[in-house]
């Protein structure tokens, strides 16, 4: 009933852990962006941003290739995953980027300043996860 969000200093909003696919996420014999590559990247980013000790259930695609505009005006595309937290103490690993994290009740998402992509998905998140 809650979602773990990071507070991004630059944009002054909460957002989900995440980032871009890097070369180390790709298969050695292909540069194709597959669901497995996206999952690897998402899990790597989760650990880079919240610590290696975080354990979660296997990631499942929640939203595939959602297009939105980031705060600086650039267009972006994101795949959002859903998982369940198992254990481990979250820790801000990139303090220059994120000031803190917060477990936010899904029913209260619109009460917080959240990222544009998350704002566009709020109703779906509520509908499917509450």
Image (tube, helix red, strand yellow):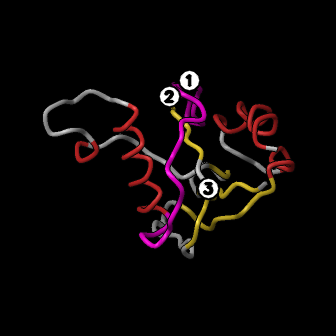
Name the front one of labels 3 and 2. 3
Name the front one of labels 3 and 1. 3
- Secondary structure beneath disc 2? strand
- Secondary structure beneath disc 3? loop
Specify the segment rendered in magenta.
50-76
Task: Kindly report the distance in space between the C-alpha atoms of the residues bearing marks 3 and 1.
Answer: 25 Å
- Residue, x 47% and y 57% (percent of image)? 46
**Residue 99 shown in magenta:** no
Instruction: Identify the residue position indicated by label 1 in the image.
Output: 67
Is residue 24 placed above or below 5 in the rendered structure?
above
- Secondary structure beneath disc 1? strand
Which quadrant holds residue 29?
top left
Contact check, label 3 and label 1, Cβ < 8 Å:
no
Is residue 125 placed above or below 113 in the rendered structure?
above
Contact check, label 2 and label 1, Cβ < 8 Å:
yes
Out of 30 and 71, give the one closest to the viewer: 30
Instruction: Identify the residue position indicated by label 3 in the image.
Output: 84
Residue 7 location (% of width, % of height): 63, 58
Residue 32 location (% of width, % of height): 26, 27
Task: Kindly report the distance in space between the C-alpha atoms of the residues bearing marks 3 and 2.
Answer: 26 Å
């Amino acid at each position: 009933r809650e979602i773990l969000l990071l507070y991004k200093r630059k944009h002054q909003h909460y957002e989900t852990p995440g980032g871009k696919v890097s070369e180390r996420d790709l298969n050695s014999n292909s540069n194709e962006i597959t669901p497995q590559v996206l999952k690897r990247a998402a899990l790597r980013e989760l650990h880079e941003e919240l610590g290696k000790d975080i354990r979660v259930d296997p990631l499942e695609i929640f939203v595939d290739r959602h297009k939105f505009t980031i705060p600086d005006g650039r267009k972006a595309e994101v795949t959002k995953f859903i998982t369940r937290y198992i254990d481990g103490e979250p820790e801000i690993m990139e303090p220059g980027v994120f000031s803190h994290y917060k477990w936010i009740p899904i029913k209260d998402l619109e009460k917080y300043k959240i990222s544009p992509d998350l704002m566009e998905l709020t109703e779906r998140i509520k509908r499917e996860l509450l």
